[in-house]
Image (cartoon, grey):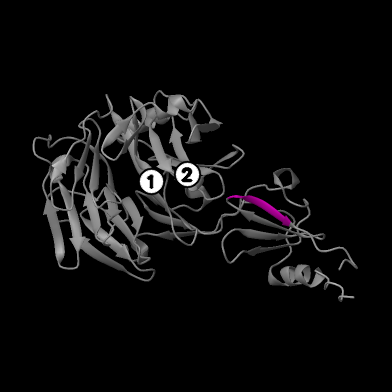
């Protein structure tokens, strides 16, 4: 007769010893770190951010580009007179590209040998407002403008503007493995393999008017925001997560000259920010406003990113804030947890959170909740 299976109780004890006992899983506690001129940042008016494949963070500020390795800043002067690195992207070879606020400034490739400035596409207006810069998987660089369409620059230096571009004004753009998405007066459109598809939000059952923000998210989601709502679509599935007529995101967009910024929080919710507004909306639609009173360096957000370690970075006109203690919000048995009573928490080495209960454990990931129960005593 095989020996009885060892009791799972030591696992619960180990979990309890690893972290302090907590009564409930709650996300309303933030640990915020700020970077500004007091921390050696040459300029605190941050316009854009990206994380390089080597792990470093890059910031576009007035008159220069900054590289931060976690300890110190390295600055690269802006080579274009009157230019500012308002948009950043990194190509498949690891080169960082920047674009200014107007098409006439062209784009810059930043390499160890120095910056290379490439002029605007032939025939394009100098004054066209730039609303996005994206390095595509095929090596092309996409330059998104407010009214002049999308320009693609190939690796051999040729500019192309695909036909059939969205009509009216564009407010924002994002790039995912499924294509380049833009939102504006024509709703949500996608550019893929050189061809445009329009009306994607309406086809998925979402409102298709006054769209001002878009970003790709986990599980293939495309997050979009209208004047008074935030939601997502994934294929033909869609959901409006949050509605508030006082948001007036269209008003924020027209004041800023570009749409608000969206950032998935990695737990089924989303951040939304503009020059004077920063909200986190959780997976259930509950929202929280964050500002200087909650520890941020400034009001609102000009750019946001989530780094490979799960930290959320918020850029504003007064510096950069890193939020490093965000956890799942108000999870209980209704969301799939084994029990509301939580005795221990530990981060799973492959991502997510392990929640210890008296009778078992729950593993929380972006894909859902998995429950593991101990074997009954005497079961062989």
Q: Is 116 within the magenta?
A: no
Front one among 152 and 322: 152
Q: Is 369 within the magenta?
A: yes
Front one among 294 and 175: 175
Q: Position of residue 346 (x, y in %)?
A: 65, 64
User: Relative to 299, does residue 70 appear above or below in the rendering?
Assistant: below
Residue at the limit of the structure toward the front, as seen here: 1
Q: Position of residue 34 (x, y in %)?
A: 43, 59
Q: Give the main secondary structure, helix, strand or loop, of the magenta stretch.
A: strand
Mark 2 and mark 1 in contact (Cβ < 8 Å)? yes
How far apart are the two marked residues, 1 and 2, measured between alpha carbons?
Answer: 8 Å
Residue 25 appears in the figure = no
What's the residue at 13%, 58% (across, down)?
116
How many C-alpha atoms fall within 10 Å of the one at disc 2: few (<14), some, or many (≥20)? some
Q: Position of residue 338 (x, y in %)?
A: 76, 52
Label 2 SS: helix
Quadrant location of the C terminus?
A: bottom right
Residue matched to label 1 = 176
How many C-alpha atoms fall within 10 Å of the one at disc 1: few (<14), some, or many (≥20)? some
Residue 193 horizontal side relative to residue 315, left or right: left
Label 1 SS: strand
Residue matched to label 2 = 220
The range drawn in magenta is 367-371
Residue 246 horizontal side relative to residue 331, left or right: left
Mark 1 or mark 2: whose residue is earlier in sequence: 1
What's the residue at 63%, 59% (across, down)?
353
């Amino acid at each position: 007769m095989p020996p009885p299976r060892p009791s799972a109780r030591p696992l619960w004890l180990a979990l309890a010893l690893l972290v302090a006992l907590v009564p409930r899983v709650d996300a309303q506690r933030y640990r915020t770190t700020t970077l500004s001129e007091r921390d050696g940042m040459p300029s605190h008016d941050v316009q854009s951010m990206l994380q390089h494949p080597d792990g470093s963070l890059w910031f576009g500020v007035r008159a220069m580009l900054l590289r931060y390795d976690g300890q110190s800043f390295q600055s690269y002067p802006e080579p274009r007179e009157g230019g500012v690195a308002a948009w950043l992207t990194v190509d498949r070879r690891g080169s960082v590209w920047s674009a200014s606020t107007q098409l006439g400034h062209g784009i810059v490739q930043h390499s160890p040998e120095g910056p290379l400035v490439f002029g605007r596409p032939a025939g394009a207006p100098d004054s066209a407002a730039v609303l996005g810069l994206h390095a595509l998987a095929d090596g092309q660089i996409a330059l998104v403008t407010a009214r002049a369409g999308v320009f693609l620059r190939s690796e051999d230096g040729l500019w192309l503007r695909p036909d059939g571009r969205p009509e009216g004004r564009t407010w924002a753009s994002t790039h995912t493995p499924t294509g380049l998405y833009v939102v504006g007066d024509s709703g949500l459109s996608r550019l893929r393999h050189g061809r445009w598809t329009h009306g994607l939000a309406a086809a998925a059952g979402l409102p298709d008017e006054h769209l001002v923000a878009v970003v790709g998210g986990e599980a293939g989601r495309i997050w979009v925001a209208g004047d008074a709502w935030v939601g997502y679509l994934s294929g033909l599935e869609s959901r409006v997560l949050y509605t508030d007529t006082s948001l007036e995101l269209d008003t924020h967009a027209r004041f800023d000259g570009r749409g608000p910024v969206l950032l998935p929080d990695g737990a089924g919710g989303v951040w939304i920010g503009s020059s004077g507004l920063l909200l986190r909306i959780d997976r259930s639609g509950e929202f929280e406003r964050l500002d200087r009173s909650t520890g941020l360096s400034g009001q609102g957000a000009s750019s946001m990113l989530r780094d490979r370690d799960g930290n959320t970075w918020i850029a504003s006109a007064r510096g950069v804030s890193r939020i490093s203690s965000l956890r799942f919000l108000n999870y209980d048995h209704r969301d799939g947890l084994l029990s509301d009573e939580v005795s221990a928490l530990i981060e799973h080495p492959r991502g997510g959170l392990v929640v210890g209960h008296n009778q078992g454990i729950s593993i929380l990931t972006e894909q859902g909740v998995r429950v593991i129960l101990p074997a009954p005593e005497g079961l062989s």
